[in-house]
Image: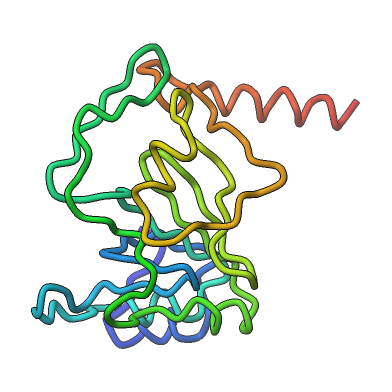
Amino acid sequence: MQAMLDMPAQFDFYDGGGLDICFLSFAEADQQGNVNVHKFNGKIMGTGGFIDISQNTKKVIFSGTLTAGGLKTMILNGEVRIAQEGRFQKLVQQVSEITFNGMDALRRGQEVMYITERAVFRLTHNGLELAEIAPGLDVERDIISHMGFRPHISADLKEMDCRLFLPQTMEIRNEWLKAKRSEEE
């Protein structure tokens, strides 16, 4: 253990911008980067520490699936396949409740990303931008047609590294060490 804090001190740390990066889930997100995690289907779930953690962290990464309610995926030879699509869109035109305000986050200088099983989006001043797509998928058929809006498409749209979808280790540490050695030479 390097530190032990009581809960109020931990929340002071969050509120004071002590986190460089955080990883949180989302129930739904919209084209302006707003996220709802606290109220859906008429039920209030509460926010827990979500607001404290997300409001002052320099880089916020939201993760979740693109659809919900029966989604089934498969991975074949490093490519994603949608075996059964979910019944509910999670990237909607407008969230029903705002727990995280995307445009306010940008005004405060936060970097915000949304990662799903098949795509990576980043928040820009023009709204969500599709930055990466999982290998084996089609942008229109497998992503945009399951969203409540059309995101901006990055001019530099990339395919996710297929090693993310393979069972063996990615060897990232070895790549990093090799690059570091090259820099030093």
In percent of width and height, residue 170 lies at 49, 22
Query: Quick check: 36 above or below 67?
Result: below
Q: Which residue is painted at 40% across and 16% down in the image?
A: 168
Which of the two residues, 3 or 143, is positioned nearer the viewer here?
143
Is 153 left or right of 102, judged from the image as shown? right
Q: Which residue is painted at 57% across and 28% down in the image?
A: 173
Q: Which residue is painted at 56% across and 64% down in the image?
A: 123
Is 33 left or right of 3, judged from the image as shown? right
Query: Quick check: 177 above or below 99?
Result: above
Q: How is the image coloured?
A: rainbow
Q: Which residue is painted at 55% across and 41% down in the image?
A: 132
Name the quarter where the N terminus is drawn: bottom left
In percent of width and height, residue 122 lies at 56, 58
In percent of width and height, residue 84 lies at 19, 33
Q: How many marks?
A: 0
Is 56 left or right of 3, judged from the image as shown? right
Toward the top, the furthest residue is: 77
The quarter holding residue 35 reads bottom left
Name the quarter where the C terminus is drawn: top right
In percent of width and height, residue 25 lies at 31, 60
Query: Quick check: 40 above or below 142?
Result: below
